[in-house]
Amino acid sequence: MAPAMSSGTSLWPAPAKLNLFLHVTGRRADGYHELQTLFQLVDLCDTVAIEVREDGRIERLEGPADIDPDTDLTVRAARALQAATGAARGASIRVRKHIPIGGGLGGGSTDAATVLLALNYLWGCGLEIEDLAHIGLPLGADVPVFVRGFSAWAEGVGERLEPVTLPERWYVIIRPAVSVSTREVFQSPELTRNTPLITIRAFLDTGGRNDCEPVVRARWPEVAEALDWLARHAPSRLTGTGSCVFAAVASCADAERIAACVPDKWRSFVTRGLNVSPLRTLLSK
């Protein structure tokens, strides 16, 4: 059951993710790219506050100033659930952002997934997780992993998911002061699109790579600088198409030590890897 913030309003966590590797294995006829990746959930979370309405209206009362409330993924998710179920009730939504926008951490997708799961509960829709993941996929390729609520091996456009249990790790995340266009990266002629499929065991042996990283390095020097700086402290990698970069370390103390040295021109985060989303844990109580 969700914890109450005030009368009629509940608070729901929306965790971020890291792509521990990202291989582009092909391009489909519809223009979408086939991928392999390993999603690592982390405890850096947005908070979504929801108040159920009886008039059927869906509105976002608080959220990122540069995103039109009417086209916000949280609003689109709520409307998609209404359309799929015929739910007569509505919702007032407030999104308190902690996950950097446009950093490759899945902030918009996780907020949408949280709305789907929370309203399925609050409206009493009774849909199964797979139904919600199906509703969420058109909103974004990362939405299903957040709906299912496990760190996962992913293939296809990111919708074919296999839950995995990963060793406990802490992560240092750096956000350079630049935004990376995912569309530009995937439309780039120099993007590698034929990386051979690998197995989970092969990833554990080799670590894989992020096929988007060479493109991002060449076009966004600030990201290249952050990758190189972090690599002096621990092996660094781009998450998604960036702009955030990260490194895995063994302990919170190690992560905090590195984060304390991050140049002031960048934001840094210390976060712990999760195998299970806190939202899934909350809904299972």
Image: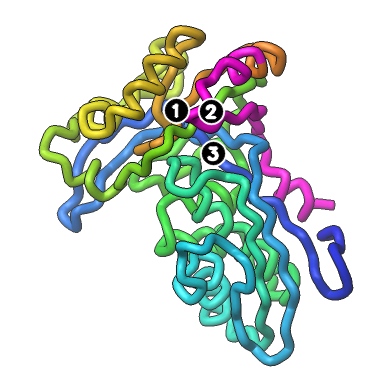
Q: Residue 259: x and y, percent? A: 60, 20
Q: Residue 126: x and y, percent? A: 69, 71
Is there CB contact under 8 Å for labels 2 and 1? yes
Mark-to-mark CA distance, 3 and 1: 12 Å
Disc 1 packing (10 Å; few <14; some 14–19; many ≥20): many
Kind of residue indicated by mark 1: Val
> What quarter of the picture does the N terminus occupy?
bottom right
Q: Which residue is mark 1?
A: 245
The region drawn magenta spans 257-285
Give the secondary structure at mark 2: strand
Kind of residue indicated by mark 2: Ile
Horizontal placement of 121 versus 85: left or right? Answer: right
Residue 228 visible to an observer of this rendering: yes
Mark-to-mark CA distance, 2 and 3: 11 Å
Q: Earlier in the sequence, mark 3 or mark 1?
A: 3
Identify whether 12 is placed above or below 101: below
Q: Residue furthest left?
A: 189
Residue 278 in the magenta stretch? The answer is yes
Q: Which residue is mark 3?
A: 17
Mark-to-mark CA distance, 2 and 1: 6 Å
Q: Residue furthest front?
A: 264
Q: Earlier in the sequence, mark 2 or mark 1?
A: 2
Horizontal placement of 216 versus 200: left or right? Answer: left
Q: Tell me which corner region of the image, top left, top right, bottom left or bottom right, holds residue 194.
A: top left
Identify whether 269 is placed above or below 250: below
Kind of residue indicated by mark 3: Lys
Horizontal placement of 198 versus 113: left or right? Answer: left
Identify whether 269 is placed above or below 255: below
Q: Which residue is mark 2?
A: 173
Give the secondary structure at mark 3: strand
